[in-house]
């Protein structure tokens, strides 16, 4: 891979991204944005596979635990949320399985 070359572009947030992380498998990117949403991106396709919204302000931070089933988010609305994201991950793998057939 050529250094500095863009290999994939992701679009879908309505405002700038405050935080982006990879999941523990390296196949998803999770982003928190000023648009108050958290998005899950398939690294291979670049598609947004899920959007979560509950914060009333900009999402300032996202972090995932080592097993990949819990996501912690913080917002400028002074709230913090702990999400069980197993259903998001299950949907992602189901989506991949269905797409390959």
Image: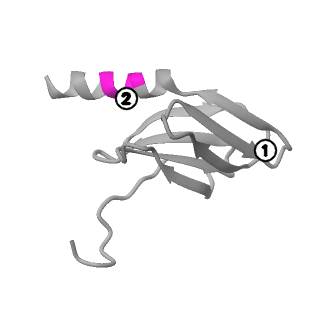
Query: CA gap, disc 1 to disc 2?
Result: 27 Å
Residue at point 63%, 29% (across, down): 83
Please tell me whether the stretch drawn in magenta is mainly helix, strand or loop.
helix
Instruction: Tell me the magenta residue range.
Output: 90-94
Question: Does residue 77 appear in this view?
Answer: yes
The residue where tag 1 is placed is 57
Which residue is most to the right?
A: 78
Vertically, is 40 above or below 76?
above
Residue at point 53%, 27% (across, down): 85
Q: In front: 19, or 8? A: 19
The residue where tag 2 is placed is 92
How far across and how far down the image is residue 22, in percent?
46, 50
- Location of residue 89 by image quarter: top left
Label 1 crowd (10 A; few <14 / some 14-19 / many >=20):
some
Left or right of 26 in this view: 54: right
Mark before the other along the chain sequence, 1 or 2: 1
User: Dot 1 lies on which element?
Assistant: loop
Residue at point 63%, 50% (across, down): 33
Vertically, is 3 above or below 36?
below
How far across and how far down the image is residue 79, in percent?
82, 39
Question: Does residue 55 appear in this view?
Answer: no
Left or right of 22 in this view: 82: right
How far across and how far down the image is residue 23, in percent?
45, 44
User: Dot 2 lies on which element?
Assistant: helix
Quarter of the image where the N terminus is located: bottom left
């Amino acid at each position: 891979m050529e250094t500095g070359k863009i290999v994939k572009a992701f679009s879908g947030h309505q405002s700038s991204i405050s935080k982006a992380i990879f999941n523990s498998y390296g196949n998803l990117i999770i982003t928190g944005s000023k648009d108050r949403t958290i998005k899950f991106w398939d690294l291979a396709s670049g598609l947004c596979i899920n959007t979560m919204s509950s914060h009333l302000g900009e999402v300032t931070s996202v972090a995932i635990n080592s097993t990949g089933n819990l996501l912690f988010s913080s917002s400028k609305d002074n709230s913090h949320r702990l999400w069980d994201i197993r259903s998001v991950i299950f949907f992602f793998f189901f989506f991949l399985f269905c797409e390959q057939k």
